[in-house]
Image (cartoon, rainbow, N blue to C red):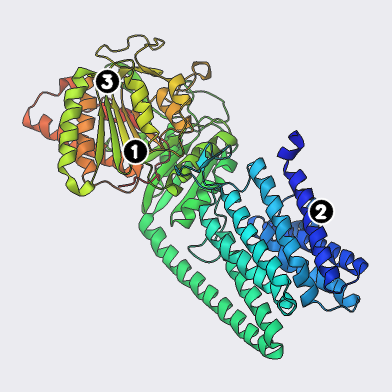
Amino acid sequence: MDFMMNYWFWGIVGLLAGGALGVRNMVKNGCPFPVAVVAATGGLYGGLLGARALYLLIYYPWIFVEDPILVIAFWESTGTWLGGPLAGLLGAALVLRLAKRTVWDNVGSFVPGLVLAHMLCRVGCIVNGCCYGSPTSLPWAVYSDALNSMVHPAALYSLLCEFIVFIILQRLWHIKTARPYLFPAYGMMLSFHRFFTEMLRGSDAAPWIIPGLRAFQTVTVFLFIISFCLFLIVAWRKRGVIASFSLCFTTVAVVLLLRFHHDAYSQFVQESKGTVLVATRTGLTDGLQPWIRQRENQGYKVVVNAWTEQPNPSDISAWIGSFTHGLSCILVAGDCSPDPNSKAPWDIPSNRLENSFGVFVSDALYGDLDGDGVPDVPVGRLPARNANQLEQLAAKSLRYERAGLGESGREVVVWAASDQFFTIAGNTVAQLQQHRELNLDIRLVGPGSSKEKAPETFLTLIKRLPIFSVIAAHGSYRSIVSGSRPVSDPQETNASGLTVEDVLSLRAPSPSGPLFLLSCDSGQFNLDIDKGPSLAEAFLQADGGPSCVIAASGIMAPETNIRFGEALLGAASDMPQTAGVLLVNVQRNMFTGMLAENTAGHHVATLSWHAGEGDEILLYNLIGDPTCRVRM
């Protein structure tokens, strides 16, 4: 029975069942059987061509000029149902006219069969996993391999809507005077329910036509108006034609006005949101295209520099420095090799700095525009080694933005994995709770519970999709320890800790909010490939992990992590819109606070903070999309 899990099986079943019902209705309407079969065939080919043409018009419009033969290549199996009805009407009407048969009542007689075919094709969508919905935690959600999360059963919603339409139209077909109106009625009902189910689709929204609507929602608006015009033409004849032209002219004028208004507004928004710089390699750029389209639709101006050969950090800094106005943030799209002279096609090097514990890397320094050692704009990195991996990491940020709040509502998860950090975390939680305007539900996981259960408890809370989460612990690049003893060996695995393997198995309906990983070495991103991902990279790669991770790329004094937590508390009371801006605010607060203490003569030796050394604050990097929004 494996063949029943194939999309094409249900497509053929739908074609046969729907075609048989449609031809049967046409014959009962008085159309000769041979004419009915040929008209149905003409409608089928017209529908296939229309479905193909509309799909290409939305996603690949240049094909109409560069390779028009592909426009009619419906056997390539890419199309959209919304393009089928009107083109199918033309094909069927041509045959009926040549056979000197009436058009509207015969086409209307076939329509219930068309709806039946659509219903059965939707069964194919369900078993095939296409036409998937957006992430949700509703009890009837289904798992989507495409998004690696629980999603709305959008194909099932469509099937149920088509079933209702089928019942209505087949019942109306028994009323002979209603038959000429069935095709326009179908067009209006199809566009109506697809407009609303499109809101729950998880696929890319595609290029917009009417501002604020997904591309296929715009198509349904036009389909509804055209179907209504056909209804007027059937009902009023010549008067209907005049009314239809007037309605179409008004629609086009309104759409053009909306586009003009949106273009002017987008220009204003771009000036206010600024420019996003993307530093990447030529072999990775294809993986960023959906992300770039989305950010441009949101008002950002995206400028990409794709190096063919490995650039030096000075090359990257010089390019960034050439943008003096309106810079919003910087995305480093590519992994970082531990070898400064690597020839790897994915390598985008970071800045190598040094503190009292050794050498570490810092992307944050790319955001220092005035050379004072303090980041001015956010910098984030998507550590990918091929275009597909880059596309998956970038899509995670977009999935997080599309998803609503999780079942936790406004929950914040804080895991203090040792007594040393638990006291600080407790004070932080108490201060956060004083900000009643934030309406936060704070869950504190501490060493008072079983050490063995603490990691599992934290991961369980992460699945509830908190708006952000914090881990304060001793650790290494592969694990953190649920206890008071630091990890001395990076290869050490602690039974009561959290490991990369634990994190990679994390599954959730959608990504959670940003994670602040306050642990030494856990944010490394310049590792040999045989060592596997660091803990921060594993969180970003995990299907149910956070949308982005802020973590340290080296070893530091515990006091620095404590200071980071205090600065985070100060920033949380006035949470910015993006994770990148949040990190910059925290780092600048830390620099300002420590500079004030140093000026006042307070001891800061344990923080390794003085001019000429790599400041430990710059160990914190954003692993993820710096434009990723923070839900506060």
Q: Is any atom of residue 62 visible in this view?
A: no
The image shows residue 415 at horizontal and vertical percentages of 28, 26
Disc 3 on helix, strand or loop?
loop
Residue pointed to by mark 1: 466
Left or right: 112, with 361 as reference point: right
Residue projecting furthest to the left: 600
Type of amino acid under label 2: Leu
Residue pointed to by mark 3: 417
Check the image and report above or below for 525 versus 95: above
Other-residue count near label 2 (Cα within 10 Å), few / some / many at <14 / 14–19 / ≥20 = some
The image shows residue 134 at horizontal and vertical percentages of 51, 47
Type of amino acid under label 3: Ala
Image point 38% across, 29% down: which residue? Answer: 460
- Which of the labelled discs sits on residue 73, or is there none? none
Residue pointed to by mark 2: 16
Check the image and report above or below for 417 versus 148: above
Type of amino acid under label 1: Pro
